[in-house]
Image (cartoon, rainbow, N blue to C red):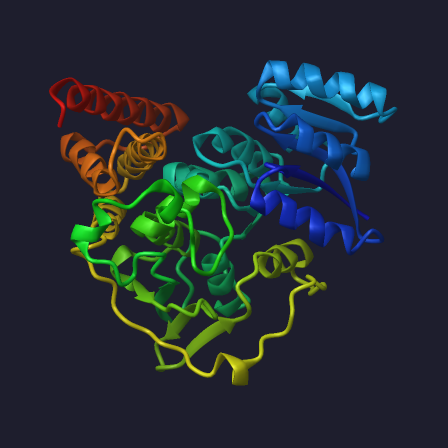
Amino acid sequence: MKRVAVLGSTGSIGVSTLDVLARHPDRYLVTALAAASNWAMLLEQCVRFRPGVAVLQDPESAQLLALELRAAQCPTEVACGLDALDAVAASSQVDVVMAAIVGAAGLSSTLAAARAGKHVLVANKESLVMAGALLVDAARRGGAVLVPIDSEHNAIFQCMPPTLQTGQAPRGVHRILLTASGGPFLRTTREQMAGVTPEQACAHPRWRMGRKISVDSATLMNKGLELIEACVLFGMEPSRVSVVVHPQSIVHSMVEYVDGSILAQLGNPDMRTPIAHALGWPERIGSGVESLDLVAAARLDFEAPDLVRFPALVLARAAAEAGGTAPAALNAANEVAVAAFLEGRLDFLGIAALTDDVMGAHRGAPANDIGDILEADRWARGLAQARLGQAARTGA
């Protein structure tokens, strides 16, 4: 019986993870759940799975959850804050950690799980983008296993040689091909993009995701961040990672070998597939996902991304090539820009423009420790907010 902590349990990945876990009560025990502030959903999850502890980042939400759990006679204890999150991730009562907290807030707990030698299911892409080398090193030193949850990276993981070592380029691999759906604006002109709304940007044609990652998918920044992730996870130079637009989202990514062979992982677009693979690895367990009907799918299309309409890909590749603190600064600037767009303070094209502005001011520095990463994050957020303030004052 493996004991599982689901960090980010109220998000889309967390909900899908609990769905898969519930299908295998003989194999997995949910011992900890964590969320930011959604105490009502966390309450429902605690009553159903009865974990030993539930963590909320928001103190008021934690108090409400504790009151409701007592009223429901549920024995789950409630903790609050990032330190509590780190403690859960490293707890001796946990074997498997689903790291699915969105944004930079998930970095510390993911590192804590790696240092403690856990089986870490990495859904928090920011931990790999911001501090990939540190995370890989922490996993190596702690004896942790890192299995990616992003459908693309999980597909690559499945197509890699069985001798794969996280962070080391596998022998015989020529390049990685990351597939992208193209998002909701694949056929939208740049002029039309200027007027899109948050609701339109969040209406992904293939996946149901949270608002931030949906916007990243619409700008293709999500694919840019995944490019950085792929370089970290699989020890590949940016020049050996290509992005290919595949609107059907059936081929989740591919690996090309030096002999000309290309291996691909296919499946219906449902995150329960990579979650089930990562939970069961190196075995296979049921996910609840319907079998792929290739005849019904009929066709698989591929095309190159338009880098003029989607400049976020260019920015991400440049950050991957620069290395050091550049990916952390890119991630931070993009987070601020996306939040401003969702709040109606920035138009859609302004997301990439603001990020580009911040990265243009960034001065490369090595990322030797978490302090360097957090300083780059703080600097980029501060500059992005300052630029937004300047634009608001001038009416730009």
Q: Quick one: 392 or 134, which is closer to the camera? A: 392
Can residue 120 be seen in the rendering of this structure? Answer: no
Quadrant for residue 325, please give it. Answer: top left
| Whole-percent x, y for residue 184 in the image | 35, 56
**Location of residue 197 with respect to 82 vertically, above or below:** below
Can residue 21 be seen in the rendering of this structure? Answer: yes
| Whole-percent x, y for residue 321 in the image | 23, 48
Q: Residue at x 46, y 73 (%)?
A: 264
| Whole-percent x, y for residue 206 in the image | 47, 60
Q: Is residue 137 left or right of residue 201?
A: right
| Whole-percent x, y for residue 226 in the image | 38, 52
Q: Residue at x 25, y 58 (%)?
A: 188
**Location of residue 276 with respect to 321 vertically, above or below:** below
Q: Residue at x 15, y 30 (%)?
A: 361
Q: Quadrant of the C terminus?
A: top left
**Location of residue 221 with respect to 274 vertically, above or below:** above
Q: Quick one: 14 or 230, which is closer to the camera? A: 14
Q: Quick one: 210 or 158, which is closer to the camera? A: 210
